[in-house]
């Protein structure tokens, strides 16, 4: 939905022209995809499915829509690992690099499509040898190493669903997820390199298995960092040993289009994470389509880099499945952007280390597309342009952003300093639940506005609605999706009722995304962030309820309330307010202990930025905590209307405490 009338976008006195030179060179350089999808959505997606994927058996009916349950490409059979690997090798592209992998210390591996196929087949045989069968679920808790992608693809080869658990999560999170999915295996590593040192993983798996996760029969461990680990006889196996003993011959199983591909747990408005279900044919179609068109892919020559973590959906769709199904070369990086290679580290003081790792990688590999998050971009802005200017970034053609609304300043910095004022920026809005991109500019089609995700992709329809569910065509509203799309979640594992209630009941007949958005006079969409009790911290979804349960888990805490306060770098930051149980005295030390307790319980990403010990919490007369007021306090704002409070003095007391620096 390009809008030819908008030739120059002006903001804060600066002008941003559209990018005509790019438009000519791009794939989607006219509106034909939109026109086709507008004419008939099912025909459009059916063509994409047939053109982008190889099917063992063609499908008949395109869509079966029994609101809110969708099935796509009915009767079709295909195998994801075949589509990602075998067919490229069969076409003579076995020597093409699938991943340029770089470890944080600076060690590298070059993995071709033929290499990947060999390793995936062997590992699939290992899984089979341990008794795993079509329909089983297993958990993967690994660092960003090639074995992570290999493990996922091996699952898909034999029809086992994977549930990847982010490496920053705690043993409790492993237990919850394994129990919920009855996972039969955990694949892990001794540790992964992060911020210059090994960060242990296997110990967390051991702790999880001591505490629960009783369905887990076997653990497979990659030796990544050579750190000492305890191996339990009969249960734990070294990856390199079992793989060496396995045959490289494992035919891909033709699976039903609606076969469960994976579960990915994500935060909702309660403390219990939801197992989002994605299936085979529809997911792969939309991920292949968006990866190709949104990044304007030239698979022969591109070196594409999504700098996310495979522990999140972005890594599933745009590090593993999208790039591989499209047969392109990707970069995969293990560590953090502020850790130089060992050979480039000067001294032991991290603060003195250069912060140019990303730019260094882009230059060395000749990266053509970079896909990262606004929080990272804002961090790079703080680090300054000197780090950037030392490198030649002229190979970059498309820049992407995902995870949270991007502020126009960060957009412009990205465009000017990383993109040399030339590359288009695709601000991609989507969710774990949507599986693939939903709202984003299309290079060559869309004239971008800094900070706006612009329009839906072809084949997806979004509408804003007001409190009463009436469609809003100009101004703010709740973001809903009004038609089924191929990579939509098929449900919440084991809880169809929660699926219905969470996404489809607020506005009947519509998928409610949980985000607010605004439509401007030109019909551009501006995402405004979550409208529910989900926080977005550095692009990671965390629910207030989860953190609250972590806080009240501390023996000194009687009651807790958590809000996401805006933060210059991380988008939102977690701020907790706690009331102590009788017999405990408020102190800075106790506050800090409570803060750390959450990190231990839920994982370091859940550690609140601050914990305030307060005498009481602001509640309405019906007993509901007024988070808006707590957010106002956390963000240092005036309080607005407090008349619904049961006790107005409570907020004053909290605010006085905050001002006096009772922050821990
Ligand atoms: C937010 C990440 C604004 C949004 C792919 C959504 C965004 C949640 C954008 C999903 C964007 C993601 N602009 N907000 N471009 N992309 N979000 O499931 O609030 O980890 O609901 O998926 O991130 O987070 P999730």
Image (spheres, rainbow, N blue to C red):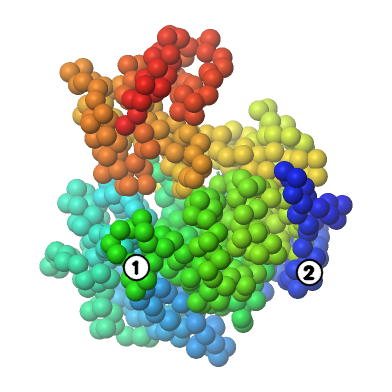
Q: Position of residue 653 (x, y in %)?
A: 39, 14
Name the residue furthest right. Answer: 5
Q: Is residue 10 left or right of residue 510?
A: right
Residue neighbourhood size for the residue with mark 2, other residues' Cα within 10 Å, grouped as few (<14), some (14–19), many (≥20)? few
Say above or below: 325 vs 518: below
- Mark 1 → mark 2, Cα distance in angstroms: 40 Å
Residue 489 at least partly seen: no
Q: Position of residue 254 (x, y in %)?
A: 49, 74
Q: Is residue 339 left or right of residue 313?
A: left
Which badge, 1 or 2, comes first in the chain's sequence? 2
Dot 2: element: helix
Residue neighbourhood size for the residue with mark 1, other residues' Cα within 10 Å, grouped as few (<14), some (14–19), many (≥20)? some
Q: Quadrant of the C terminus?
A: top left
Tell me, for residue 345, which label it has, or none.
Answer: 1
Say above or below: 566 vs 494: above
Name the residue furthest left. Answer: 233
Q: Residue at x 77, y 63 (%)?
A: 19
Name the residue furthest bottom. Answer: 92
């Amino acid at each position: 939905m390009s809008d030819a009338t908008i030739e120059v976008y002006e903001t804060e006195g600066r002008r941003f022209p559209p990018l005509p030179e790019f438009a000519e060179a791009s794939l989607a350089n006219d509106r034909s995809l939109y026109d086709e999808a507008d004419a008939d959505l099912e025909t459009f997606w059916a063509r994409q499915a047939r053109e982008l994927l190889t099917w063992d058996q063609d499908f008949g009916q395109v869509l079966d829509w029994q609101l809110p349950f969708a099935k796509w490409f009915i009767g079709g059979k295909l195998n994801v690992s075949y589509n990602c690997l075998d067919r490229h090798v069969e076409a003579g592209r076995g020597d093409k690099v699938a991943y340029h992998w770089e470890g944080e210390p600076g060690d590298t591996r070059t993995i071709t499509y033929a290499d990947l196929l060999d390793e995936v087949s062997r590992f699939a045989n290992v899984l089979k040898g341990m008794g795993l069968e079509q329909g089983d679920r297993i958990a993967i808790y690994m660092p960003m190493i090639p074995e992570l992608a290999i493990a996922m693809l091996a699952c898909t080869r034999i029809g086992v669903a994977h549930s990847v658990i982010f490496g920053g999560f705690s043993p409790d999170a492993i237990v919850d997820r394994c129990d919920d999915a009855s996972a039969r295996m955990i694949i892990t590593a001794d540790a992964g390199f992060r911020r210059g040192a090994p960060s242990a993983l296997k110990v967390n798996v051991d702790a999880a298995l001591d505490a629960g996760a009783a369905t887990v029969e076997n653990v497979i461990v990659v030796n990544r960092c050579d750190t000492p680990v305890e191996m339990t006889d009969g249960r734990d196996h070294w990856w390199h040993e079992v793989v060496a003993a396995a045959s490289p011959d494992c035919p891909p199983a033709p699976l039903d289009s609606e076969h469960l591909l994976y579960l990915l747990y994500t935060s909702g408005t309660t403390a219990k994470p939801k197992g989002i279900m994605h299936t085979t044919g529809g997911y792969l179609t939309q991920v292949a389509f968006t990866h190709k068109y949104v990044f304007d892919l030239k698979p022969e020559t591109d070196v594409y880099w999504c700098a996310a973590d495979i522990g999140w959906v972005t890594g599933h769709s745009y590090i593993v499945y999208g790039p591989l199904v499209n047969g392109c070369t990707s970069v995969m990086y293990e560590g953090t952007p502020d850790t130089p290679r060992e050979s480039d580290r000067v001294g032991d003081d991290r603060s003195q280390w250069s912060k140019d790792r990303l730019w260094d990688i882009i230059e060395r590999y000749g990266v053509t597309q970079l896909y990262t998050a606004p929080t990272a971009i804002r961090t790079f802005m703080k680090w300054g342009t000197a780090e950037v200017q030392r490198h030649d970034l002229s190979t970059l053609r498309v820049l992407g952003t995902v995870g949270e609304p991007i502020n126009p300043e960060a957009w412009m910095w990205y465009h000017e300093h990383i993109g040399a004022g030339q590359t288009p920026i695709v601000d991609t809005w989507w969710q774990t639940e949507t599986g693939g991109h939903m709202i984003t500019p299309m290079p060559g089609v869309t004239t971008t506005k800094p900070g706006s995700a612009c329009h839906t992709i072809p084949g997806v329809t979004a509408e804003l609605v007001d409190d009463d569910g009436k469609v809003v065509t100009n101004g703010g509203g709740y973001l809903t999706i009004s038609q089924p799309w191929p990579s939509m979640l098929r449900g919440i594992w084991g809880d169809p009722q929660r699926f219905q209630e969470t996404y489809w009941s607020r506005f009947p007949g519509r998928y409610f995304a949980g985000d607010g958005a605004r439509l401007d006079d030109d019909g551009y969409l501006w995402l405004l962030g979550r409208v529910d009790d989900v926080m977005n911290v550095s692009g990671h979804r965390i629910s207030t309820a989860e953190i609250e349960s972590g806080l009240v888990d501390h023996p000194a805490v009687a009651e807790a309330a958590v809000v996401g306060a805006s933060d210059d770098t991380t988008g939102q930051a977690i701020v907790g307010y706690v009331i102590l149980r009788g017999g405990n005295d408020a102190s800075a030390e106790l506050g800090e202990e409570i803060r750390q307790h959450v990190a231990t319980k839920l994982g370091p990403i859940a550690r609140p930025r601050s914990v305030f010990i307060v005498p009481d919490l602001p509640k309405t007369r019906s007993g509901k905590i007024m988070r808006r007021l707590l957010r106002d306090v956390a963000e240092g704002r005036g309080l607005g209307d407090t008349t619904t409070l049961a006790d107005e003095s409570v907020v004053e007391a909290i605010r006085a405490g905050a001002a006096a620096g009772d922050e821990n």
